[in-house]
């Protein structure tokens, strides 16, 4: 791994300040020097370092996806995801992992896997260098109840292999299930606390008892694992706070009490709403049978409205809202994840700066790595993107692979910049 000196970049350091013109030196897997430079000035050359002339391109921290499902296979239903044979499925996950890195997501938080060990195997293969992918936290399957979101068995085919999730009933089965996933080596236990209208159980229904949830949390914590919840209903959001479930996915339906509870503990929780899935299910999925009438019957337009109001309220209260969520359906294919940032701006009123911070500064703690990730600062891990354009002017540039000139993870280029192009016309029109 050679040292890399980025010069003449617009540096967005993840701290919320306006970007500055500067140089950044990477040695090993760390950022060791960040220097502000005036126009035309350079830092002295560093012996042996590869120099990348940013030509005014935007240098920012790698992004963190807070709700990732590598094993969702860009298909239109849970059944179609789950029925992929395991051999093809693991190869699919490996390809998808690379796609995230290609698109600038240098870290991803697994939010459930379609078969028991896919996430763990992929995480391990990334970590030992067998495959290419982002930093990754591996999840369990979705733990659910008979008839709940993730129980895709049929009455005459009750075998667990036909289930998308891990189906449990009662505290005893819950405890056994958590222990099994702990044995497999997951980082996160994923529990489905609410329904999901597309599967037949409405999003504002909640199926687990508090007793079952408590067993899940207690058992997960005793193994040192994190719990993340699919929680669309208001009761399920409150249950996450009451029971200390750190990661709350969706949180569509809230009331004042839920918002007050969350605000009181805002640095103990992360919220990843996964708005892209709701927005595209409501507006862009008719070719897969989800016509206007069908989604109206499922009540998704009402849920989208509620979710937008909930997120606006959370934003006002300073609750940590992160991008990511349920990409990997036919109408939300993997790799388009930066749309979340656009939706944060368009739907919930974040500034592009806030949207960018949600994908960077909040990402370190979401990855359980504190302030080592998500910043372009001395001492931080060198996960960096060089972008042609200014996401603070136009947040959608992060959706375009061609505009992401370089991706560095842990001090190594996943994609090195096209040097000649970077030396060409300055993209930054300051
Ligand atoms: Zn999900």
Image (cartoon, rainbow, N blue to C red):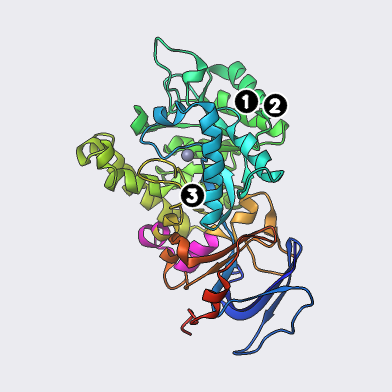
Q: Is residue 318 or residue 368 the one in the foreground?
A: 368
**Mark 1 Cα shell of 10 Å, populated few (<14), some (14-19), many (≥20):** some
Secondary structure of residue under mark 2: helix
Question: Label 3: which residue?
Answer: 324
- For the residue with label 3, is its CB less than 8 Å from the closest atom of ligand 1? no
Q: Is residue 91 above or below residue 360?
A: above
Q: Is residue 392 above or below residue 264?
A: below
Quadrant where the image shows the N terminus: bottom right
Q: Position of residue 345 (x, y in %)?
A: 40, 62
**Mark 2 Cα shell of 10 Å, populated few (<14), some (14-19), many (≥20):** few
- For the residue with label 1, is its CB less than 8 Å from the closest atom of ligand 1? no
Q: Which residues are magenta?
A: 343-358
Residue 340 in view: yes
Q: Left of 174 or right of it: where is 272? A: left
Q: Is residue 124 above or below residue 264?
A: above
Q: Position of residue 2 (x, y in %)?
A: 75, 66
Tell which circle, 2 or 3, labels the residue nearer the N-terminal end.
Answer: 2
Secondary structure of residue under mark 3: loop
Q: Is residue 339 above or below residue 250?
A: below
Q: CA distance from mark 2 to mark 1?
A: 17 Å
Q: Position of residue 63 (x, y in %)?
A: 56, 58
Q: CA distance from mark 3 to mark 1?
A: 28 Å
Question: Label 2: which residue?
Answer: 183
Residue farthest along the top direction in this orientation: 156
**Mark 3 Cα shell of 10 Å, populated few (<14), some (14-19), many (≥20):** many
Question: Label 1: which residue?
Answer: 215
Q: Position of residue 274 (x, y in %)?
A: 44, 47
């Amino acid at each position: 791994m050679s040292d890399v000196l980025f010069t003449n970049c617009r540096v967005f350091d993840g701290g919320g300040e306006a970007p500055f013109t500067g140089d950044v030196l990477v040695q090993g897997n760390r950022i060791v020097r960040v220097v502000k430079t005036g126009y035309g000035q350079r830092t002295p050359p560093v012996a042996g370092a590869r120099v990348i002339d940013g030509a005014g391109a935007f240098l920012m921290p790698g992004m963190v996806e807070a709700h990732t499902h590598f094993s969702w296979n860009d298909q239109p239903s849970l059944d179609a995801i789950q029925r992929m044979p395991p051999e093809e499925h693991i190869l699919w996950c490996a390809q998808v992992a690379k796609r995230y890195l290609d698109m600038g997501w240098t870290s991803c938080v697994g939010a459930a896997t379609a078969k028991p060990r896919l996430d763990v195997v992929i995480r391990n293969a990334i970590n030992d260098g067998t495959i290419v992918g982002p930093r990754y936290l591996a999840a369990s399957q979705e733990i659910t109840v008979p008839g709940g979101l993730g129980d895709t068995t049929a009455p005459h085919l009750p075998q667990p292999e036909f289930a998308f999730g891990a189906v449990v009933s009662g505290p005893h089965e819950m405890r056994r299930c958590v222990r099994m996933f702990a044995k497999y080596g997951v980082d996160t236990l994923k529990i489905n606390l609410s329904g999901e209208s597309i599967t037949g159980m409405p999003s504002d229904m909640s199926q687990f008892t508090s007793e079952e949830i408590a067993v899940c949390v207690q058992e997960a914590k005793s193994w040192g694992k994190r719990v993340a919840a699919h929680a669309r209903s208001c009761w399920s959001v409150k249950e996450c706070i009451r029971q200390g479930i750190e990661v709350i996915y969706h949180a569509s339906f809230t009331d004042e009490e839920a918002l007050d509870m969350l605000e009181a503990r805002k640095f103990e929780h992360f919220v990843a709403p996964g708005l892209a899935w709701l927005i595209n299910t409501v507006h862009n999925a008719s070719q897969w049978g989800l016509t206007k009438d069908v989604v109206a019957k499922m009540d998704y337009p009402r849920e989208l409205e509620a979710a937008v109001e909930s997120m606006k309220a959370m934003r006002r209260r300073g609750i940590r809202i992160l991008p990511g969520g349920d990409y990997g359906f036919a109408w939300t294919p993997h790799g388009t994840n930066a749309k979340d940032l656009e939706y944060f701006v368009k739907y919930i009123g974040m500034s592009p700066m806030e949207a960018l911070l949600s994908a960077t500064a909040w990402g370190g703690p979401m990855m359980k790595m504190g302030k080592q990730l998500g910043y372009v600062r001395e001492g931080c891990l060198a996960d960096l993107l060089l972008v042609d354009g200014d996401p603070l002017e136009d947040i959608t540039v992060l959706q375009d692979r061609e505009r992401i000139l370089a991706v560095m993870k842990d001090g190594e280029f996943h994609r090195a910049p096209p040097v000649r192009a970077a030396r060409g016309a300055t993209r930054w029109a300051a």
